[in-house]
Amino acid sequence: MRVQKQPLACGWYAGTRLATLAAMAAATAVLALSGCISMAPPYQAPALPVAQHYDADDGRDGLSAAAVGWQAYFTDTRLQALIAQALENNRDLRTAVLRVEEARAAFGIQRAETFPHLNAQAGINRLSIPADLSPLGMPMRVSQYQVGAGVSSWEIDFWGRVRNLNDAALESYVASDAARRAVALGLIAQVADSYLVLRELDERIALAQQTVDSRTETLRIFSRRVAVGATSRLNQTQVETLLTQAQALLTQLQQARDAQAHGLALLVGKPIDLPPVAEPLDERRMLAELRAGLPSDLLTQRPDIAAAEHRLRAAHASIGAARAAFFPRVALTGAYGTVSPELGNLFAPGTRAWVFAPSVSIPLFEGGKLRSNLDLAEARRDLAVAGYEKTVQSAFRDVSDALSARKWLAEQLDIAQAALAAQTERARLSQLRFDAGASTFLEVLDAQRDLLAAQQQLVQVRRALLSSRVGLYAALGGGTQAVESASDPHTHLSLTPTARASGETTP
């Protein structure tokens, strides 16, 4: 015997008409009260733990580093090509970009918790009851068909727990994007500095090669003089000593150039072909002058400081979520659909079923877990404060060091140029004295050795001055907008005040 029984709608519901339920209308009124309370402590940026001005600032006029893109600041076409390739291929930057994607996905997961989760379901249940268990004393078979959709355990965020978790994820997302920009800016500075060192080595190799060629010719002349008895063997060995010293320096510089080229290729992320450049470095043409500005400007110019501040904001939001966990948690479960014992009557009149089930969960005892979670969030907030202050102090030092290097290296360059002029004149006069028989060749030996050292030192100081300007550009957070557009425009995040409040992003 088969008995058809109308079941209660207790597991499968649904509908696209959820908003029409009177019970859910009441829930809407409840929702209006949620989101008005936040347990997060009010955010206050820590006081700037640095002086109000840079001690090494010479007050010179120049461009604002933040307003100058790297394409405009680095005018050397070879260097521009290397930076562009590095921004495209460098693995560290690629990792930073993927970190942004990871943070974006985590933010999307958390943001989804602010919306109700709607599930559409359909199913069939068949139940067979033997006669000895049947209330009718005979075998029973019950069928139930259902289709619908519903909302399951949607938390009403009275105390801001979900919203604070969403804000924390958003701030972490923004921090990862700022960290990506910091990596890109650091990469630009590394490539520029490595390129300048390579150019320095090219110039020093050219000078060393000229010296080797000149001393090779001098050795040939002295060998002929020794052969005809016009000079002593001692003078010839002294010339040989000069030549071997220049040859040793040349090989050392060539080895250093190869190593520098390999390091530059690693930064660029692909093999590069950079033949030696004979043109000397010119500090007046390659880079523009920059003004230091105020230490407070770094808060908006340096992407690493921006990343530290967003991490601090995320820590504040996490405290709010930890505090809200102490309060009751209200959740809604609702559904609307149709249920019928016959498949053909599933959508017939009178088969509609719905459920509205709010629930309240009050924490009573969890073994100190909630207190420990709050302590953990506060400790992480304090760590974020310390990290933020350390980042600001490090940025201040970077700028101060770069300004100091720019000032003193400029003076060293003037001294090196004067020293080279003096050594050149000394070498000329010592050669004249030796040719006139007024001195030994040892005087010429010392003069030429010192001349080569002065030539090499001048090139090194000139490159160091250019490197200090590169360091100043990076320390001041130069060209942030250009870094964003060049490194990966798809990961750039711009937040308006309204979007920040709602968690939405604008391209």
Image (cartoon, rainbow, N blue to C red):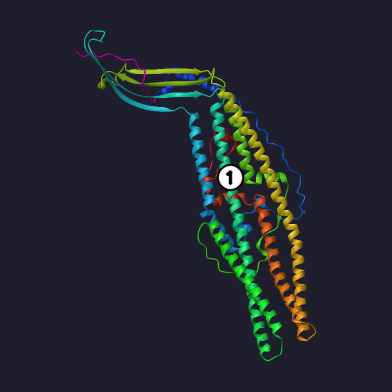
Image vertical order of residue 23 relative to residue 405, above or below: above
Residue at the image position 50 percent from the left and 37 percent from the top: 106
Vertical placement of residue 65 versus 462, above or below? above
> In the image, which residues are magenta?
1-16
| Residue assigned mark 1 | 179
Residue most toward the front? 233
Outermost residue, bottom side? 228
Residue shown at 45% from the left, 20% from the top:
24
Circle 1 SS class = helix
Quarter residue 173 falls in: top right
Asked if residue 448 is among those painted magenta in the image, a careful observer would answer no
Q: Position of residue 319 (x, y in %)?
A: 60, 29
| x and y, in percent, of residue 251 in the image | 60, 70
* In the image, residue 419 above or below residue 146: below
Magenta span has 15? yes
Residue 252 visible, this angle = yes
Q: Is residue 278 visible?
A: no
